[in-house]
Structures are given as structure tokens and as C-alpha cells.
Image (spheres, grey):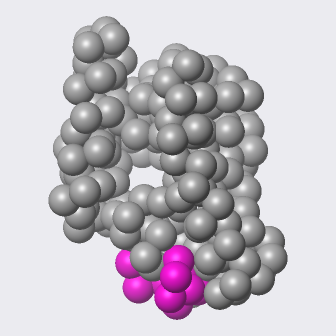
């Protein structure tokens, strides 16, 4: 909580700049919210800067996801709904800044398993081994899976299993220094550029 408050104060000029840029390039709403699954399987409203055209949820691309479901697009770098500025925000991970609000109100942590959308969560319950164990801790803005390349599109069930395995490794070996390590690796990845950030 203290870390989030300090970081939000430091990054406030960037936050305001992104807020204005989204407003100028694509208008309102500035933020995007969706239901995600958090600790103990409870859903919560998850915030990001909007990176897609307005009403993007009504314009889901006609694709088949890893679980064979059509009309549900979880993560795709070629998604035509993403705005030009939105691509930049995703590439730099600046679209994630509003999640510090989620930390402040108590439904997320800075570090932990990334929260999945409800449809992806429901689909993964039956296909990914030990999937629900990732919900015994608060979800995070960044996590062990993300700094190890398990972010972005999950092309098949094996990709999701790898992500969950990283989440469980983190949960079983958690300590404060591990969190600090992940924070530092996250910063390095953002500065260096992550090919899976989109």
C-alpha cells in the first residue's frame, strides 16, 4: 500500500499526461474496466487506460480462442480494435497504471498472479491443472509469470499451464525480497521493451 502511494505520487505527471493523450486521441471514456477474478475467486472491477475503440466489447473479433470458443478474444496483437495510441500504451505497459487504484482499494497487490477476465477464468478451470490455486492470494499488477515472458496471448492450453505453474511457484516461495526482485525485473522489462507486451 505504501509502495503504491509513493509510486503514484512519483508517476502522477505521467498519469496525467496519458489521461490527456487518451482524451485527445480518442475521447471519453478515459478508462476501461472489466470484471476480473481475484482472491478466493471473487470478482472485482479492474481498471486500465482505454486502449481500444469505444464499445470494443461489442465488436469482438471473430476468432477462436485456446479453448475453442468463438467470439471471445482474450489477447491478440493483431486485434483491429486497438487504437494507434493504445498500441503505444500497451507496448510500454502505461495502460496498467490505473491498477494502482485497485491496489489502494484493496482488491489487488503490486505483485501477484495477474487477474484473468471472467470468461477466460471459467474456461481455464476445466483445462488447466491446479488453476484455482492461483486465487489463494491477491492478484497483482505484475508477477513472476509476467517477468518470465508469460504475458500477452495464450495460444494454447500449454501456454496457460506454463503461466499458472509460474504463479504457483511464486505463491509457494513468496517473501518480501522475491517481490522486490519482481518489481526490479518488471522495471527492467518495461525500459528494455517486452515483445509480449501488446
- Does residue 101 show up? yes
Residue 116 location (% of width, % of height): 54, 46
Q: Residue furthest right?
A: 28
Q: Can you see residue 120?
A: no
Total numbered badges shown on the rendered structure: 0
Q: Is the magenta region chiefly helix, strand or loop?
A: loop
Q: Position of residue 34 (x, y in %)?
A: 71, 55
Q: Is residue 188 magenta?
A: no
Residue sitting at x 42%, y 29%: 111
Judge whether 89 appears above or below 187 on screen. Answer: below
Nearer to the camera, 25 or 194? 25
Q: Say left or right for 25 vs 2.
A: right
Decide if residue 3 is on the left or right side of residue 92. right
Residue 100 in percent (x, y) is at 60, 39
Where residue 53 appears, as percent x and y from the top left, is 67, 84
Residue 78 falls in which quadrant of the image?
bottom left
At x 62% / y 77%, what residue is drawn? 21
Quadrant position of residue 39: top right
Quadrant of the rendering where the C terminus is positioned: bottom left
Looking at the image, residue 135 lies above or below residue 23: above
Range of magenta residues: 76-86
Judging depth in this view, the residue of 66 and 4 nearest the camera is: 4
Amino acid at each position: 500500500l505504501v509502495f503504491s502511494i509513493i509510486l503514484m505520487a512519483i508517476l502522477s505527471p505521467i498519469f496525467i499526461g496519458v489521461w490527456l493523450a487518451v482524451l485527445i486521441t480518442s475521447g471519453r471514456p478515459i478508462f476501461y474496466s472489466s470484471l476480473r477474478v481475484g482472491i478466493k475467486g471473487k470478482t472485482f472491477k479492474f481498471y486500465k487506460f482505454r486502449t481500444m475503440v469505444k464499445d470494443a466489447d461489442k465488436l469482438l473479433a471473430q476468432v477462436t480462442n485456446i479453448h475453442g470458443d468463438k467470439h471471445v478474444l482474450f489477447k491478440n496483437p493483431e486485434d483491429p480494435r486497438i487504437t494507434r495510441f493504445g498500441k503505444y500504451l500497451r507496448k510500454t505497459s502505461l495502460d496498467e497504471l490505473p491498477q494502482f487504484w485497485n491496489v489502494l482499494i484493496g482488491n489487488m497487490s503490486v505483485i501477484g498472479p495477474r487477474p484473468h477476465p471472467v470468461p477466460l477464468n471459467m474456461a481455464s478451470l476445466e483445462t488447466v491443472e491446479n488453476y484455482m490455486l492461483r486465487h489463494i492470494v491477491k492478484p497483482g499488477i505484475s508477477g513472476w509469470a509476467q517477468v518470465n515472458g508469460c504475458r500477452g496471448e495464450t495460444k494454447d492450453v500449454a501456454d496457460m499451464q506454463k503461466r499458472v505453474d509460474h504463479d504457483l511457484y511464486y505463491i509457494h516461495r513468496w517473501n518480501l525480497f522475491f517481490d522486490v526482485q519482481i518489481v526490479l525485473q518488471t522495471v527492467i522489462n518495461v525500459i528494455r521493451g517486452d515483445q509480449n507486451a501488446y
